[in-house]
Image (cartoon, rainbow, N blue to C red):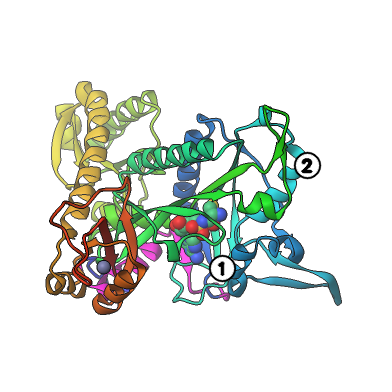
Amino acid sequence: MTKPTREKWEKEFSRWFDWILEEAELYDYGRYPVKGMGVWRPYGFQIRRRIIELIREILDKRGHEEVLFPILIPELLLRKEKEHVKGFEDEVYWVTHGGLEPLDVKLALRPTSETSITYMETFWLKSYRQLPKKYYQVVSIFRYETKATRPLIRLREVTTFKEAHTVHDTFEDAERQVLEAIESYKEFFDRLGIPYLISRRPEWDKFAGALYTIAFDTIMPDGRTLQIGTAHNLGQNFTKAFDFKIQLADESLDYPWQTSYGISDRVVATIVSLHGDDNGLVLPPNIAPVQVVVIPIPARTDEDKRLVKEFLSSVVNVLEELKLRYRVDDREELRPGAKFYYWDARGVPIRIEVGAREAKEGKVTLVRRDTLEKEQVSLEELATKIVELMDDIFNNIKDRAWEHLRKRVLRTSNIEEAKEWISARRGVVEIPWCGREECAVHLEDELEAKALGSPWPLEKAGDEDTCPVCGRKAITWMRYAKSY
Ligand code: 5CA
Ligand code: ZN
């Protein structure tokens, strides 16, 4: 495949995205003979694993407990909560046979797990003393998506679905939990350098079965938004549907309150897309499978070869001591240039080049992946320099990504201006909003964009701000964008 650039236009970005998944051997999509399902290859798998470790760390420290539920949900359970099943009905894969026998009870491949988890909670949780309870699992879910499927972005098997499910004795405590979930996700995305907008989804676009949904969206290089995480206040909808009651402090019995929140493979898609450049991936050092690659430059004379080899082992000692994930690429069959290309595509944060000249001077050449800047560093300074550089690289790619996002958000009450912004694929517009669905739907049509919701935490519109559709006083803003 010829190398496309990742710049602005949808077509190019899409091609760049497909190219890098293949070039960096992350994820094989399209060859596996089931639509919407892909294969994690070893390099991609390692990135995915570190992302999962990060979310585990963040949830565990806030008192979540990891569980693992069966993949199959009996039809009856899935149908208990009416809004929920309405939302998912046309996306469920059903298992109808065991071998040649038709099953008595149809079994759903879980599209998410509110129903199966609530069902088991009715046996486990009896008293307010056990609450709050916070479970999570990292599993595959299945959704028969009808919108265009895309690798990592819209899958039919979502293989990196982290879903958290919590139970509370009061509405207020569930509200507090939603805030905690938002804090957890902020920390998670911040530690990956992924910028986001937080919106309260419109009433008509909340999670099926929720009271309301708070969503994290990011803006991809083609100007389209991608929902990368959601937190839902489920109220008592599921606990009532399952007749799940607990004993409260005053001895009365009542339905507990729930929340749920999830992220997916889309997190990997955003790391790839937002930090990457024309040469390929640019990985945050904390999740890079290889943090430093050492490339020996072939020497001509035997004496020089010996020198390089010796110097190389001192360099390796430094990396060992720093406990870094490093690789010495001493493949004979590849020229240094080909190795640079190979590791650049894989996003390795730091490259060290060691040749005879460097060995003689007791120095190495360091190249940082984010800017491709080079510098010479002595062996003595190497350890400090690498530690500094990893921090620098992370901060730089994070700042860069945030700057891009900020530049892509336009606040305006001028519909023509908004239209232009959207049609030129610039990103998101924020338009004063009176709070009425019909005005938002009208603008969705006019802008040919989706209403993402209002800024969270709620931002009150100014006294002079009016809804450009109906002229009423605006309460807040509504965000619109082309979205995945
Ligand atoms: N049970 C709740 C909380 S885990 C739930 O399922 N919420 S969700 O439907 O909003 O999904 C959580 C997140 O998964 C979404 O915010 C989105 O980032 C991601 N996601 C949803 N569907 C897909 C899909 N088909 N492919 C990739 N990611 C998806
Ligand atoms: Zn209006």
User: Distance from label 1 to label 2 (Cα)?
Assistant: 26 Å
Residue 461 among magenta residues:
no
Most extreme residue toward the front is 472
The location of residue 91, given as percent across then percent down, is 58, 72
Which is more toward the observer, 221 or 199?
199
State ligand 2's quadrant: bottom left
Q: Crowding near pointer 2: few (<14 within 10 Å), some, many (20+)? A: few
Q: Crowding near pointer 1: few (<14 within 10 Å), some, many (20+)? A: few
- For badge 2, the amino acid type reads Phe
Determine which quarter of the picture holds residue 112: bottom right
Question: For the point 64% across and 65% down, which residue is it?
Answer: 82
Q: Judge: label 1 CB < 8 Å from ligand 1.
A: no
Up-down relation of residue 279 to residue 249 (above or below):
below
- For badge 1, the amino acid type reads Gly
Give the side of residue 374 with respect to residue 445, left or right.
left
Q: Secondary structure at mark 1?
A: helix
The location of residue 99, given as percent across then percent down, is 84, 73
Question: For the point 60% across and 63% down, which residue is it?
Answer: 84
Question: For the point 64% across and 53% down, which residue is it?
Answer: 238
Q: Magenta segment range?
A: 8-34
Check whether the beta carbons of the residues at disc 1 and disc 2 lie within 8 A of each other.
no
Tag of residue 87:
1
Give the side of residue 365 with respect to residue 281, left or right.
left
The location of residue 209, given as percent across then percent down, is 57, 59
Residue 9 among magenta residues:
yes
Q: Secondary structure at mark 2?
A: helix
Q: Report the residue marked by disc 2.
A: 123
Question: Can residue 368 be seen from the camera position used here?
Answer: no
Q: Judge: label 2 CB < 8 Å from ligand 1.
A: no
Which is more toward the observer, 361 or 8?
8
The answer to which of marks 1 and 2 sits earlier in the sequence is 1
Where the N terminus falls, by quadrant?
Answer: bottom left
